[in-house]
Amino acid sequence: MASLHVLIVDDEPALRQILAAIARQAGYSVVEAGGAAEAAAKLARGDVDVALCDIKMPDGNGIDLVRNTRGSGIDTAFIMVTAFGSMETAVEALRAGASDYIVKPVNAEEVLHRLSRIEALRGLREENQALRRAVGERAPKMYRFTSPGMLEIERLAGKVAPTDSTVLITGESGTGKGLIARTIHEKSRRGDGLYLQVNCSAIPENLLESEFFGHTKGAFTSADRARKGLFLQADRGTLFLDEIGELPLHMQTKLLHVIEDKEVRALGSEQVRRVDTRIIAATNRDLREMVRQGKFREDLYFRLSMFHIHIPPLRERQSDIRGLIHYFLKQARSDADGSYVSEIDPEAEELLLAYGWPGNVRELENVINRADILADGNCITVADLPQYVMKGGSAANTPGTAAREGGLRDQLRRIEGDIVQRAIEEAGGDRRAAAQKLGIGLSSLYRKIEELEQPGLIPDAASSTGRNR
């Protein structure tokens, strides 16, 4: 499905009609201008991709039009239409900034060849721009999950990927909805096209329409140049709308129309553009409840949820946690400069396994990365974990973890308190010597003392006396 917006500029109505018919039959959107002044007004909006432009017109010439358009910063490609024997003029137009030329009488195949070539070049340029915007954002590699729930998610993603169906991905924050969306895109026929991700909650409400659908130059006060919206940028690719539940109702209506009609109109433009963009949406909110409350359109919900994938929280797939711990450790090592962690102490790993992970996979990754930075030597220990993880945090409210809270964790911390206290006593209160004996850094020992003295697992004397304080 073509997406170029073409302007035909010629003072001869018959030739305009011929060129317009050729472009429309190929699926391009077309507008016409009978002279240089009318063309300049249409070009000034900035939404014309290609101008098929005559060189000699009663009120001006195409070369000046090219030069003035370029000088205004408008990114329109020009294909000049010149009479046979006027090659010097055509060359002058190319020097002024035109992309190509054709000779009268026009040939339909030649016109379409020129247009398709410009379309391909513009597509490559826009893809390169999107890739440059993504520099520094590593394409996430899919972790090979082992839990039955996530294996089913992978199966569903593989089934829906080859289709053009919209997909709704739901689940708590941090469960990996973006990873599943990208996986669907990469396994689809659009895998070589653009994958654009947008957080709907991060765009100011007054800019939503411009971001989604684009705008022409002068469409509003600060619109100093035309801009393609997300739908046109992702034409023939995938647009991932994260936090879809945050869209206001008026934008929900416009989004529904785009999905149904496959057409967009930029702010300030009279021209409707065809788009072939696949939509994948995600949310951590209950859209069905929002529909009942009148906060989300029911028809949009049904459109988005043609294929629904729900990702279970990490606490419901315990068999994934151990593998994820070591996966993130490996990722942290690959990013390090040589002074990296190579293993995790069994006691620290048991605490991580016992925690409820309310922030899901994202929280686990953050904890591992933090511990990797804090760790002394080549091993993450209990002392390198956040205090709330050792205390259980919100895990106490997580189903199935209450027994562990009262058992293994308390026992581990009591044992740990005894070990730390004994090491300090045997070192005669010398913290540095005690840290060396325990195989941890001095700063790690201080953190551990502070954590253990609060619940009374280490005597105050051990934490307040001795040297190196």
Image (spheres, rainbow, N blue to C red):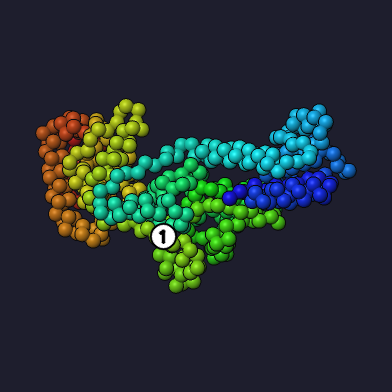
Task: Specify the quadrant of the image occupied by residue 326.
Answer: top left
Looking at the picture, how far across and down is residue 276, in whole percent? 55, 52
Looking at the picture, how far across and down is residue 410, in whole percent? 16, 51
Image vertical order of residue 91 relative to residue 31, above or below: above
In the image, 3 versus 212, the foreground residue is: 3
In the image, 415 versus 34, the foreground residue is: 34
Label 1 residue SS: loop
Left or right: 237 as drawn, with respect to 80: left
Give the amino acid type for the residue marked by disc 1 in the picture: Phe
Q: Within 10 Å of the Cα at label 1, are there few (<14), some (14-19), or many (20+) other Cα atoms? A: some
Q: Residue at the spot x=12%, y=43% of the render?
A: 418
Looking at the picture, how far across and down is residue 245, in whole percent? 47, 61
Left or right: 176 as drawn, with respect to 247: left
Q: How many marks?
A: 1
Q: Residue at the spot x=70%, y=43% of the render?
A: 108
Q: Residue at the spot x=42%, y=68% of the render?
A: 288
Q: Which residue is mark 1?
A: 307
Q: Residue at the spot x=25%, y=59% of the render?
A: 398
Res 161 seen here: yes
In the image, 359 versus 264, the foreground residue is: 264
Looking at the picture, how far across and down is residue 210, in whole percent? 61, 53
Question: Quadrant where the C terminus lies?
Answer: top left
Image vertical order of residue 293 relative to residue 144, above or below: below
In the image, 266 versus 164, the foreground residue is: 164
Res 199 seen here: no
Image vertical order of residue 34 relative to residue 247, above or below: above
